[in-house]
Amino acid sequence: MASDAITVPVGQTEARPWVDELHQWVTTVDHKRLGILYIVSSLLFLVVGGVEALIIRIQLMHSHNNFVSPEVFNRMFTMHGTTMIFFVAMPVLFGFANYLVPLMIGARDMAFPRLNAFSFWLSLLGGLLLYFSFLGGSGLYGAGNAPDVGWWSYAPLGSRAFSPGHSSDYWTLALLVSGFGSIGTAVNIIATILCLRCPGMKINRMPLLVWMYLVMAGMVLLAITPLSAAQIMLLIDRYLGGHFFDTQAGGSAVLWMHFFWIFGHPEVYVLIIPCFAFMSEIIPVFSRKPIFGYPVMVAATVCIAFVSMSVWAHHMFTIGMNSYANSFFTLTTMAVGVPTGIKIFNWIGTMWGGRIQFKTAMLFSIGFLFQFLIAGLTGIMMAASPFDWQLSLSYFVVAHFHYVIVGGILFALFAAFYYWYPKMTGRMLSERLGQWHFWLFFIGFHLTFDVMHIPGILGMPRRIYTYEPGRGWDTLNFIISIGAFIQALAIIVFVANLIISYFKGAPAGNDPWDAWTLEWSTSSPPPAYNFAMVPTVASRRPLWDLKHPEDPDSRYE
Amino acid sequence: MGCLIIAESAIFTIFVVAYLFYLGKSITGPTPAEVLETPIFYTICLLSSSLTVHLAAKSLERDYRRLFLGLWLLTIVLGGLFLFGTAEEWHRLIYEHGLTVSTNLFGTTYYSLVGLHAFHVTAGLIMLSLVAIFGFAGRMGVSQSGRVAVLSMYWHFVDAVWVVVFTVVYVVGR
């Protein structure tokens, strides 16, 4: 271990004019700066997507509401879904990968720094293209028109006849462009992990976060590309008069569904595996115990990656597949719960008997564990195809996947923010505001998404812009909307915390959490060159070895 | 490049699946059996270019620069011939048989699959030509052999895809 890397001071430079500073950020190829650019841009999109969610919730607050027109409502749920998945969740996770992976494996930068910058600007361009549709969706008519056919853009809704103008084209191009960005980053992550590990960092000594990002990047290669291919087909249909998804010429609408969900379901795991990665770093540190079952965790991750590639059609039970297909996809979907369950046991095993410190990051992690468990359980319920026939396309499904994405992914992301913010900025996030953030968000989340299961069971379909009074949905929807506003309040607290702590937070020092992985051995924020000397590691917890030379981990490996 | 090839394979897989799925589902003609002719000569061109690019990369490793340049140019010529073959076939299909992307499902899937492959050949030819220009400028030495090896890997991939496309379109599809 390069212990003197800790004492190297950050090169303090004089304040530069802001144009200079901006120029440096725009032209940077530094993995840390790109990571922060990814994270900041996705936070901006998070706010935009959140506002869209609030518009949806205001409209559904009571029956026969006229807050927005049906057309605007359609645009809102389409844009909300597309934004949150492609321009919030993906970039923010890539941002953390960019920032953390080279630091954790003791590398100077990513394997292809310029490809890295290119990928970031591609995915940002994709997001801007999507939002430009508000202005340019109808060409020069002046009346803007965002995509309004749902984030799946099921055929034939995406075809020219049903989606005139350019709104769907902006959607297609945005996803195509950001998809290429994702592939570039995935290639980069894999090359970095395989080629740039520091001496002693054998593949079975890598931090679990690095392992899981390796698996995630591999999945991106296989999951995003079918979407890109399908988007190319859609473009051919729309512009060259092709018939891929044109049923009148013998084409198949179901094929689009298959192609979309071959992407769509692995995508869920592309998003959740990095969150598993955050949990596997954060829970051990705040439980003061090494991770329980490292090899099993890796095996379970790889297992999830494989199985999740063959579960996509459980999104399509209601289109009338034959019973063999239904049984196959029911079985695989249930099977994917097994490795996931193993992981949850391992995290609980890590906490078991540990000296748990209830910092904000740990609170969010514990929230993640329980909510992700419930999300998994409703998932198993709907994996049974007869059950799915009853509840598919109802608010039960909406509640289920928001439980995964908000209760699982977003909670894990918040934990990651509280854990790594000190490393990225050199300042601690305020614990007091953090507690407010956690409890407000926790209450708001459960108010919204626990209750949301019930109108689903009562038969409320998703994507309706209003409903008749007297069906027993009114009170429930009102409660759901109130929960949404509490969550929005919590997000405001969070953003305030990010901004206030950046200027006034307590200095973090190199290693505020007494953690064990390499990123905490360098200064906060790390210098451009990351490590003054290339670190050498001898175990899975290099900093433990450094702090406890009398009893190093390497003795037991 | 290995990763990129995995990703590219997934894209091609989707197009191949679409082609196979829509085989014989066209409502109107022309059908593949009526209009397609097996492009044996051009296939041989493309496949043998895999050999020449491999030998070229090997000779660069041993610093036989003239041999490298010769084999490299041969690769470009063979790739160009293949592309010419595709263009000729498309010309025939469009002007003699009136088959375009919008004619029927066969047209849609055929032009997208073969076109996607031709696009990759074109991209490969551009990269090969860039290397050739550097070669004439005398910049290609042993130090570049790693990069050339990566490029030749891409070219092998394009060839391997053609084997699949050929099987699907000209053997199974008819």
Image (cartoon, coloured by chain):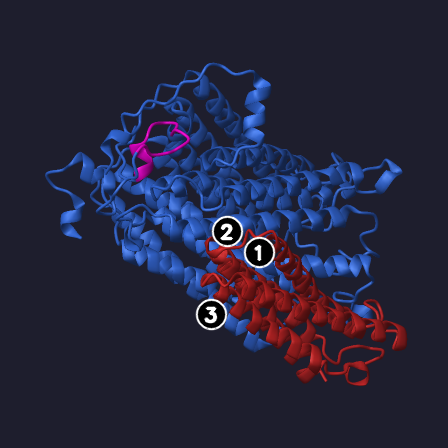
Q: Nearer the viewer, residue A104 or B94?
A: B94
Q: Colour of chain B?
A: red
Answer yes or no: do the residues labelled 1 and 3 have beta carbons within 8 Å?
A: no
Q: Position of residue A22 (x, y in %)?
A: 58, 24
Q: Position of residue B79 (x, y in %)?
A: 67, 68
Q: Can I make out residue A402 in this image?
A: yes
Prevalent SS, magenta region: loop
What secondary structure is marked by label 3? helix
Q: Please report, as a chain letter, where disc 1 is located.
A: A
Identity, as a three-letter code, of the amino acid under mark 3 = Leu
Identity, as a three-letter code, of the amino acid under mark 2 = Ala
What secondary structure is marked by label 1? helix
Question: Which of marks 2 and 1 precedes in the sequence?
Answer: 2
Identity, as a three-letter code, of the amino acid under mark 1 = Ile
Question: Where is mark 3, residue-wise?
Answer: A331
Q: Is residue A322 above or below residue B57?
A: below
Question: Image point 23% across, 32% down: which residue?
Answer: A3
- Please tell me whether mark 1 or mark 2 is closer to you in this view: 2
Q: Colour of chain A?
A: blue
Question: Where is mark 1, residue-wise?
Answer: A224
What secondary structure is marked by label 2? helix
Q: Position of residue A454 (x, y in %)?
A: 55, 49
Decide if residue A232 is on the left or right side of residue B152: right
Is label 2 on the same chain as label 3? yes
Question: Image point 38% across, 62% down: which residue?
Answer: A338
